[in-house]
Each structure stands twice: as structure tokens, then as C-alpha cells.
Amino acid sequence: MEIAVLLKQVPTTESLIDIADDGVSIKTDGINWVMNPYDEMAVEEALQTRDEVGGKVTVFSLGPEKAVAVLRTALAMGADAAVRIDPEDKILDGIAVAKVIAGELKKDAFDLVIAGHRAVDDDNFQIGPAVAEIMNIPHISMVIEKNIADGKIKCTRTIEGGTIELETALPALITTQRGLNEPRYASLTGIMKAKKKPIDTRLLSETGTDPGTPMVETIAMRLPPQRQGGRMIDGDSAADKAAQLVKALREEAKII
Amino acid sequence: MSQAVLAITEQIDGSFKNVSFEVISAGAKIAGSLKGQLAVAVMGSDIENIAGQAAEYGAEKILVVDHDGLKDGLSDACTQAAAQLVEKTDPLVVMIGATSLGKDIAARLSARLNAPLAMDCVDVRVDGDQVVATRPMYGGKVLADVRLTGSPAIVTIRPRAIKAVVAPGAGEVEKVDINLDGTRLNLVEKHMETGKIELTEADVVVTGGRGMGGKDYGVIEALAESLGGAVGASRSAVDEGWRPVADQVGQTGKVVAPNLYVACGVSGAIQHLAGMASSRVVVAINKDPEAPIFSKCDFGIAGDLFEVVPAVTAEIEKLKD
Ligand SMILES: Cc1cc2nc3c(=O)[nH]c(=O)nc-3n(C[C@H](O)[C@H](O)[C@H](O)COP(=O)(O)OP(=O)(O)OC[C@H]3O[C@@H](n4cnc5c(N)ncnc54)[C@H](O)[C@@H]3O)c2cc1C
Ligand SMILES: Nc1ncnc2c1ncn2[C@@H]1O[C@H](COP(=O)(O)O)[C@@H](O)[C@H]1O
């Protein structure tokens, strides 16, 4: 089975985010960059699938030079090959990213593509299904369980209020949701080996895909209003505190 | 005929989801700014009897797509239907609820139509002849205004972000035939938890964190029930196996925006705050007076949750007498 995994490098979720002087991007100094947490699950799922049915796992990331780090992490976890698509400083919106990635995926015959259901930086929830659409393959989002047999993939995905089990024919794309697996840590030998594996770097201008001019452009960014320290409710007993709280919620906040 | 806005609705158990009315209201506002018509799509099977409700929120036209293949709300069938509705109505803006289905439809539709998309927006407006949407990024740590160039501009609306406003429209019903040949997803089984209030739609959310110390969420459930709310969990509680992943609030869980959020035994990690920051009123109950959650709440009680939470429930119950 030929499996492709899509990886994005993002700020760690602990990061304190501040807005840069240009007003439309974030300050990057002091930020630690890591693999998008949902993409770690994507790598894990790909490795488990390969180890079960055989085949090869190729990881893709579209990003600047520093994105090599997440590709190396995936190689250290056990991926077989890595491709970095260099955007050459071009600004790309979600659709453009999807077009470029889909263009590269189409150059090989992948049976299964795995992405995260969202990247925790732009929170777009877009690239997975958009790539599937451009590749003209089915997709199943937010998968928490999957089974592959006889050229078909059966997945359980989360929806509001429950789960739903779906089946489709391969090739297909799935996106990951928490609960699918526990991503492994790279072993020391894995890390050593990964250092020596080549990374196939492709320049955007040489991919043959025209990403088009951006249709979605950030024109302003601001920090949402922050809650100041709350009012502590004192009292002699739990019952006393509870009574005061409920009074405050009723009379001041007027919400109950 | 060309329409200003096409609002796509979604149902659950034969009724509209709340977010559908919010989407129609947002659509009515945009249609007003564009001085054009608002068409509302109602897609499903056996939905004719509810379709008329769309008029109460401002639908000028109601496009009813009744098809067996739309019964289960599968994303590929719904995308196919949505694409055909876009072709028919030629809208400048398409609006959809940012639900798990809505996000799937929006992402595929934008790729199919090569159209701009702003996902999970909390506001949308028309500026000159362009659509500008406001959307949280970085797990809600930032709000970004994005400008969409090209048509149709596709905007998905986060549940509870925009108020549903009753404002009757003409509501002229038109049945639309669509073709669902070639869909590729097959439903095997649906497992729904009946009677459970969906976190993202709840007016009140009561969350239990690692301070629960175990699987027994009885005190949390009792408070949630007395307030008519839903139960949430921190990631630590989910990781411990005390609660299902679907209950997780936070940057890698659900983003909630209830009127009242009660965090019990939650320390207030940045990833958790990201998921609840837009709640209207936040109450924190924690036995550690130094817990970071107290600096991000409106009302705090330092104390043992197993004593305080039942006491709060008792007070709420008193109000009902
Ligand atoms: C990539 C990544 C993504 C993450 N995403 C999320 C996410 O989406 N959501 C999320 O919640 N976390 C997320 N986290 C985890 C987050 O960093 C914290 O570890 C987590 O939120 C802590 O959960 P907690 O507050 O329940 O537990 P703790 O931090 O252990 O806090 C427990 C609190 O309970 C209090 N307590 C204990 N007993 C009692 C009692 N009897 N009465 C009252 N108070 C009591 C303690 O004083 C303490 O403050 C993520 C982490 C990472 C690395
Ligand atoms: N630049 C990128 N390179 C590779 N994969 C990406 C990139 N951006 C997004 N993805 C993939 O798409 C998923 C969803 O991202 P998004 O649609 O941006 O929220 C991520 O979890 C990745 O798997």
C-alpha cells in the first residue's frame, strides 16, 4: 500500500501568540515549531497500516526550509520518504496549498492519503477535503477508527452527538481526530537514521501547478478581549459560597 | 436566477439545527448589504414539512431538495447537492454552518468551484464589493479579518457566534431536483447518543477536569442537568479515559461559547482556555487558590469541587421551587 501523509509545521499549542508589526501575521520570535498534533496521528496511522499490510509511507510538507524539521521527525518515527515543497516565499491561501499538494500527490499512485483534520495555527479544516476533491477521490474526516480490506476502507468518524461508520473504495483520503491512536515517539536510532535519509525538495515554480492569486487574504489581526482576573467568592461554607455565586449569576450576570 | 446569498441549512432528527437559523440570519444581513435576495437550501429526505420555518428568519426563497440519498447527511452527497444549487442560483455568497458536515461540504465546494473560503467564522460583513469575515485562529488566541475575492465567497459560521433573529421573509418554496449519481461514501452505521445536548450548541457547559479524580462525574452531571447544559472535559480527563474524546473542550477539542461555562477541577492550561474563552460568563471552582483558571474567569470559588458543586446545584434547584 502506497500511503501519503500531509504534515504542517505549526507553533506549539502552549505558545503565547502576539501580533506582528505588520498587523496581519504573528510574531515568530520565541515560538517553538512542531508537527501539527493531528499530523502526528496521521503519521502514526500510516506507519501502523504499512506495518500491517506492507508498502511505503511518504510524508509531504509544503513549507519553508525550517519545515524540514517536521519531515525529519516523521522519518525518525519510521516514514520511508519525505518531500518538501518550497513555496519560494509566495503567499498561498488554503485553496492554493491544496492545489499544489494535490498536484504532487497525483504524480504517484497513492492508495491512501492521511491528513490532520485541522492545523492548529490557521484552524482551516480545509486542506484534507480540498485535496481529495482536486484528486477526485472520496474522503472521510475526523476518523477515530479505520479498517482496510479488499480495496475498501471502513472508518468511524465523529459527528455532533455521536459517531458514524462509513465505507468507501480506495484510493481515499482520511483526516485524523483525537482517539484514533497514540502517536509514537521517535527512537534514538530512528532519529540517527533520519538524519541520513534524503529529503526530496521541490520548488513550487517547478511543480507545474499554478496556485493562482490568493483569493483569501488576511487584512487585520487582533487579540480577542481578555478576561481580567475574576471575582473570588468568599464564604464560611460551601453552601454559603454557592448561594453567593448563584445570586451573582442571577442578579449581576443575569444569566440564570 | 442569480441570488445574492445561498444559505445552506442542516437538520438533526427531523428538525433544523440551531446553527441553521444563525446561518439564515447572517445570510439575511449579507443579502441586505448586497441588496439582493436570500435563498435558503433545505436538503434532506422528508423535509418539506419543516422547510417553511426558514421563512421566519428571512428566507425570500426556500429551495427544497428532497432526495433519499440525502437522508443520512453524508458529505459527498451533500456536496454534490450544494454544487448543483450553486450552479442553479449563482450566488455571490454561500453560507453554511461550521458543523462537522458543513465544514466538509465547504472545503470540497471551494475546491470544486475554485472559490474562496473562510472557515468557522464568528462574523461576516460586506465591505465595498467584497466579503470580509472574522475568524478565530491559533485556537482562538487571535481574531483575523479575511477578505474574500472571487465568487461565490464561501463562509462557514461557527455555531452560537451569530444570533438568530426572527425577521420574516417571503419564503417562496421551490422544489429542486438534483442528481446524486456517482457518490462514493456508503453509510455502514450511525451511533447517536440520544438526549445528549451537543457541547457546541449548549447554553451552559459544566466541565470536569483532572480534579474529578476518576470516572464518576455524578456531581458535574447533576449541575449540568439542573442548568439544562452539557458536560465537558479537559484533555487530561479524556486522556485518563474518564470521558469520551467528543467531550473535550480546548484547542484540540471543541470550541464552546455558552452563556455560562463552569470549570470544575480544571487548572486553566492555555490549550483549555482556547476552547472556552468566548463563553459569556465563566465560573471556576478549584481547590488551589493559585490555579491559573482564576485569572481567566468572571467568578471563582476556591474549594473542593465535591463540596462546592453539589451546593451550587442545590441553590439552583431552590430557584426552581
Ligand atoms: C498538543 C496539546 C494539545 C492540548 N489540547 C488540549 C485541549 O484541547 N484541551 C485541554 O483541556 N487540554 C489540552 N492540552 C492539555 C493541557 O496542556 C493541560 O495539560 C490540561 O488542560 C490540564 O487538564 P486539567 O486542568 O484537567 O488538569 P490539571 O492541570 O492536572 O489540573 C487539575 C486541577 O484540579 C484541581 N483539583 C484537584 N482536585 C480538586 C478538587 N477536589 N476540587 C477542586 N479542584 C481540584 C487542581 O488544583 C488543579 O488545578 C493539550 C496539550 C497539548 C500538549
Ligand atoms: N502546508 C502544508 N503542507 C502539508 N500539509 C498541510 C499543509 N497545510 C495543511 N496541511 C494538512 O492539512 C491538514 C489540515 O490543515 P488546515 O486545513 O490548514 O487546517 C493538516 O493537519 C495537514 O495534514
Image (cartoon, coloured by chain):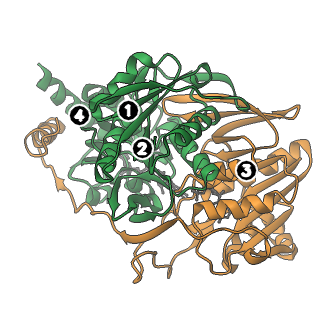
Chain colours: A orange, B green
Direction from residue B225 to residue A169 in the image, left or right: right
Q: Is residue A200 above or below residue B295?
A: below
Q: Is residue B298 above or below residue B56?
A: below
* Discs 4, 1 touching: Cβ within 8 Å: no
User: For the view shown, which residue lies furthest in the right direction?
Assistant: A54
At 87% across and 57% down in the image, what residue appears? A108
Q: Is residue A16 visible?
A: no
Q: Position of residue B241 (x, y in %)?
A: 55, 37
In this view of the protein, which residue sits in the foreground, B105 or B55? B55
Q: Residues within 10 Å of mark 2 (few under 14, many from 20)?
A: many
The Cα atoms of the two marked residues, 2 and 4, are separated by 21 Å
Discs 2, 1: same chain? yes
- The residue singled out by tag 3 in the image is A114
* Discs 2, 4 touching: Cβ within 8 Å: no
At 50% across and 52% down in the image, what residue appears? B152
Mark 4 or 1, which is nearer the eye? 1
Q: Secondary structure at mark 2?
A: loop
